[in-house]
Image: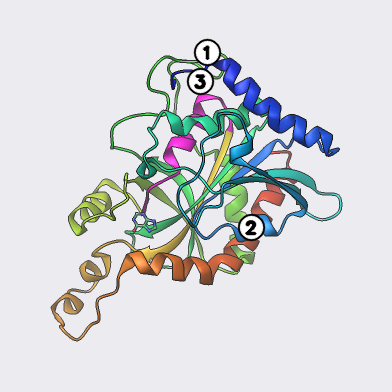
């Protein structure tokens, strides 16, 4: 628990959001989507939407990353009869200076608000040669060897138990549904393991080699603190990554001849992230819309 962030804090923050929604004649959504790098287009697809800046919500952290907007967007998905969902348009990261513990705050606020299903999206580097820039990856599980936990420190029992299981943390029924929709998606969809790195530096080639040996398919600097918080408060959870680059050194490992060639231009994976995210954003958002709509139709099952 972050000092001062007692249960009363969460009630106050969630109460503020609820009041704004009720004043606008809306119900409180039961599904929330956290939008990662390159996923902001998804929020623009929502109908009849309103924005609540993070800065308006008492005690809510704000984003410092210029490509992350910092607002809750509430709007309808899935046609005229669809439901409202809530999007975090922009997230907070460990590399911005937030502690792991502070990163539990947004998800616990959504939980107290009444959200039952959480969808996490992100941009990721691939350490699996089968998973290429522009592909989507349904997250099956994650690896976080880096120390710390969003639930470190005094527990707030009203939010969840002191000790909690993370077995099947990414809800199987949601993964199955998303993979069923893969053949109709405008991009290739895989299932894989996400490994957390704290950033903001990208990984060394040796770290990526280690990630491959450990069984990771993709790597990134977000998602796991939110996933662990969702597990703590008993939410259903789904994660979808957009591969924006091959992780450091992966191309060279795949093709030793390339490593030896001095004619090959060095590709900077850091610059590649925004270029690929922008290119793949439309097809990623439309697949995400189909997936989230299917979750809502199944009432979050
Ligand atoms: N490493 C870490 N985070 C990332 C990457 C990467 O290669 N690509 C997008 N986010």
N-terminal-most mark, 2 or 3: 3
x, y percentage for residue 284?
57, 62
N-terminal-most mark, 1 or 3: 3
* Residue 72 versus residue 20 in the image, above or below: below
Magenta span of residues: 218-235
* Residue 252 versus residue 261 in the image, above or below: above
For the N terminus, the quadrant is: top left
Q: Can you identify the residue that label 3 sits on?
A: 5
N-terminal-most mark, 2 or 1: 2
Q: Is residue 224 left or right of residue 186?
A: left
x, y percentage for residue 240?
52, 51
Between circles 1 and 3, the one closer to the viewer is: 3
Q: Can you identify the residue that label 1 sits on?
A: 157
Residue at screen point 39% across, 32% down: 100
- Badge 2 marks a residue whose secondary structure is helix
- Badge 3 marks a residue whose secondary structure is loop
Magenta stretch: includes residue 270: no
x, y percentage for residue 5?
51, 20
Q: Which mark is residue 42?
A: 2
* Residue 256 versus residue 50 in the image, above or below: below
Between circles 2 and 3, the one closer to the viewer is: 3
Q: Is residue 300 left or right of residue 109?
A: right
């Amino acid at each position: 628990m972050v000092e001062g962030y007692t249960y009363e804090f969460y009630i106050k923050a969630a109460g503020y959001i609820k009041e704004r929604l009720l004043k606008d004649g809306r119900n409180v959504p039961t599904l929330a989507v956290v939008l990662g790098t390159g996923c902001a287009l998804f929020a623009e697809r929502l109908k009849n939407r309103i924005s609540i800046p993070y800065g308006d919500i008492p005690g809510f952290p704000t984003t410092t990353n210029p490509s992350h907007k910092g607002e809750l967007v509430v709007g309808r998905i899935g046609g005229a009869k669809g439901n409202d969902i809530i999007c975090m348009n922009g997230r907070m990261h460990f590399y911005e200076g937030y502690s792991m513990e502070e990163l539990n705050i947004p998800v616990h606020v959504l939980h107290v608000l009444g959200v039952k299903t959480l969808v996490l999206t992100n941009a990721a580097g691939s350490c699996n040669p089968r998973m290429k820039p522009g592909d989507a990856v349904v997250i099956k599980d994650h690896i976080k060897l880096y120390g710390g936990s969003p639930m470190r420190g005094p527990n707030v029992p009203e939010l969840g138990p002191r000790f909690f299981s993370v077995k099947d943390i990414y809800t199987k029924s949601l993964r199955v549904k998303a993979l069923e929709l893969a053949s109709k998606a405008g991009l290739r969809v895989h299932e894989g393991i996400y490994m957390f790195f704290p950033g903001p530096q990208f990984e060394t080639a040796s770290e990526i080699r280690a990630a491959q040996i450990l069984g990771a398919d993709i790597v990134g600097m977000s998602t796991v603190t939110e996933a662990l918080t969702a597990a703590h408060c008993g939410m259903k959870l789904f994660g979808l990554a957009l591969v924006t680059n091959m992780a450091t050194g992966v191309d060279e490992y795949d093709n030793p001849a390339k490593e030896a060639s001095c004619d090959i231009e060095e590709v900077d994976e850091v610059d590649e992230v925004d270029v690929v995210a922008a290119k793949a954003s439309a097809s990623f958002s439309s697949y995400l819309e189909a997936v989230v709509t299917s979750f809502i139709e199944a009432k979050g099952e």
